[in-house]
Amino acid sequence: MGIILEVKNLTKKFGGLTAVNDFSFEIKRGEFIGLIGPNGAGKTTVFNLISGLEKPNSGSIRFDGMDITGLRPYKIVNKGVARTFQIVRSFKYLTLLQNISVSCQSHRGKEASKGVGIDKYASSILASVGLVDKARIPPVILPHGDLRKLQIGKALGTNPELLLLDEPFSGLSHEEQQNLTDLIVKLNDDGLTIFMTGHVLRELMTLVPRVIAMHQGKFIIDGTPQEVANNKIVLEAYLGKGSEEFA
Amino acid sequence: MLIKEFQEKITNVPNYLKSWVKTFTGGLTLFCLLSLLILPFLSQNLNFTHVFLRVFTLAMIYSIFAASWDFLTGISGQISFGHAIFFGIAGYICAYLISYLGYPIWIAIIMGALGAVLAGFFIGIPLLRLKGPYLALGTLAFSLVFLKLFLMGSLSDIFFGSEGISALPKLSKDPVVEYLILLILMIITFICIIQISKSKFGTILKSIRDDETGAEASGINTTRFKVYAFMLSALFAGIAGSCYALFITAVNPTGNYGTVISFFAILMASLGGLTTITGAALGAFFFILVEYFLIVAGAADSVYLIFAVILIVVVRFSKQGILKPLLERIKDLWDVLLGR
Amino acid sequence: MIEDIINMIFNGTLNGAVLSLIALGYSLVYGVGHIMNLAHGAYFMLTGYLLLWGLRIFPGLLFLNVIFVVAIVTIIGGLTYILLIKPLQDSQVGVVLITFGLAFAIEQIVLINFGTDSVSISKYLIFTETTDFLGFPMADQSIFFIVMSLAIVSLFALFISKSKLGKSIRAVSQDREAAVLMGINANRTLFYTVVISALLASVAGSLYLPGAALTGPSMGWSYLTSSFAVVILGGMGSLVGSVVGGYIVGFLTSFTSVFIPNGPSWAHLVPLIVILIVLIIRPRGLFGKKEIK
């Protein structure tokens, strides 16, 4: 049970704005962790830095002991880090099965699918996220909840060890949220390390055993949902926006 | 593993063909191909074989060219406004090898195409980081560089200047044989491109087209695949370019590197329907035939203007191309007639 | 030698003056709408040929011709937006294709009516004399044009920073959604932007082309590529970049023309080489940003 992700002094500036400021934390293998902060706190930027979409100005990111700071996204994926996006994206003109088979053609995906072949492997992943009956449909007509599942399926196709979920519940109905939660919990139970962002405390409180909170790019606190919810700075950060977000 | 899959595919081919022919598009395509096969033998009239038939041969050359463009732009999502480069380079290499080094025709054609592939590599790499309109203009800039370089009088020792190279042999002295050779080349090219597009490799290219960041996030080295797309597209464009050089029996800068040629690729593929590949053939035949009839009718000056207007109208009103929706209407009619 | 240097500086400035005006409009449209209007070079070329046509139809009314022609090209710019660009806004590829088609169509129309020979429209020259500077003759019209170009650029800068429309333009170019939320009509702003860009190109054409010559309908493409080179060098969407880039490209071209053996033919390649070098080394150019500054 080692440390799977180690982030040290991560800083990212966009022109005059410091989106991520000297941010550090560690995640152990198999954990299920939440990253919270109000809108604009820098959560997605942290994800972008870890997954390689952005390069940090300073700081380092180590995955499973390997330095992945500033590597190209596809290389990071092939080390074992996959992510989903806050705004759902898919390959619009491909079928669901094809959407997943693309990730199965990454290095890691090809390794994992060696025995059964890419199509069967992609099919099984589609089944594991509950979308196998829609395999031949393009994403265009899917409801939002299914699209979020598809994103997870695409990430799973690369056989990741760490999964970054960026606001996976936004825009979902209560039932869809429940569905998705079950899926995520099962993935974690099966050994996948999950790092999830959200800006509403309610959903995360009951879900994850450990939460990291950030505000305006800076680290605030790392602890249990209870500890985080009672933290003064966190309260200020949220109460400033409207107390109903914190309930 | 792969060999087994391949063997399975091969044994499946006859069944696949049988069921394909029964579909509307399959049957229609077969009908068109058979008609094209029979065409040359319909008349012994010299005007027919030496003029009219050659129009079709030219259409087939452009079909291959337009299909290569559709592969790069429609399937892989890399917009090319300078496709004439590959066309021209292949033509010049082919011409040079035959005229100055005495190479046999077919070797020269292949070398020309390979030269185009190299060009695809060297052009793809610097332009890769560009997307959308930037890539389009980057390719246009490259093709203009080639055009001007080859036109420069001061460099005519290396690049043959505005005279180019002439007195090239034809693919065959008999226009009917020339026609049939191109027909076979066209069929082979289309089968190759369509199969590549449908393969897993093709799916990756399409994913890069649909969402490049997403493809990268799925662990795909998008740079490498984009270069592959350029090189494959250049290969087929080069085959067309070499054949064109032999068809016209000469190469010169405006004739082989002109922006009109790039324009034609865009025009033909767009009319036939982007991403369809077969639409490129439809577009090519349409425009070459229309051009021929306009010239015969005495309106040679207005040809390009009419084409430009058609492009504007097609892009404005239908991104799918006009011919594909038209075919779909016909298909619906066909189904109704057959009582389905 | 001295003559050569003055030649280079003078012509470099002249090139810069015309390129900055053309590139300004092109960059403006990209900055506001994130679209490339490939017909931009055609507006410039069309101005020249419409002026030529005016010479044939109304030979006496030079000044009125100019006003008329500039108005026509400006209107064409507006129509381009309404009929072709606006419906295709969501697709960058579509806009590029359709404006490409338009540029081609305009070129063909001019070709059919005027052929490919070089023509001069020197009748429109306001100043016909030359001034001598250390032995090098400088056309007065060119001096006039350089002054006018700088004046127009300054006026434009003022317009962008002070006027209401200018502020809308800046807002939409920074963040279209936010601008719309603030009550700005993004569509109308983009419309005016395209109109202004056509106006700039046309004014530049009517002041510059009488002193140069109309080298054929395909000259529109040269100016488009040069414009693209300027904008890429300066940074897409950066107006300062368009002006600075314009003069840099202008000087590079005149330097090549004067000092490199077989200069004038190599000069044609300068913009293209600039494009390729910038795209390969620093794609966002010198001042590349998304907003208009």
Image: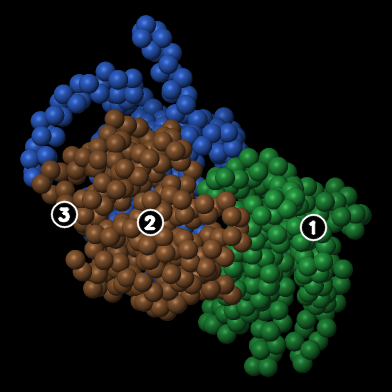
CA–CA distance between discs 2 and 3? 26 Å
Of B64 and B339, the residue lying toward us: B339
Q: Tell me, yes or no, whether the two marked residues, 3 and 1, touch with CB atoms within 8 Å.
A: no
CA–CA distance between discs 1 and 2? 44 Å
Question: B80 left or right of C289?
Answer: left
Q: Indicate whether B134 appears above or below C276.
A: above
What residue appears at the point 60 percent right and 42 percent down from the top-left corner? C88
Q: Which mark is residue A111?
A: 3
Q: Amino acid at mark 3?
A: Glu
Q: Indicate whether B170 appears above or below C209.
A: above
Q: Is residue C23 visible?
A: no
The residue at which mark 1 appears reads as C165
**In the figure, the green chain has which letter?**
C
What residue appears at the point 55 percent right and 46 percent down from the top-left corner? C91
Question: C217 left or right of B240?
Answer: right
Q: Are discs 1 and 2 both within one chain?
A: no
Tag 1 secondary structure: helix
Q: Which mark is residue A196?
A: 2
**In the figure, the brown chain has which letter?**
A
Q: Are discs 2 and 3 both within one chain?
A: yes
Please tell me how crowded label 1 is: few (under 14), some (14-19), or many (20+) other residues with Cα within 10 Å: some
- Quarter holding residue B160: bottom left
Pointer 2 or 3: first along the chain: 3
**In the figure, the blue chain has which letter?**
B
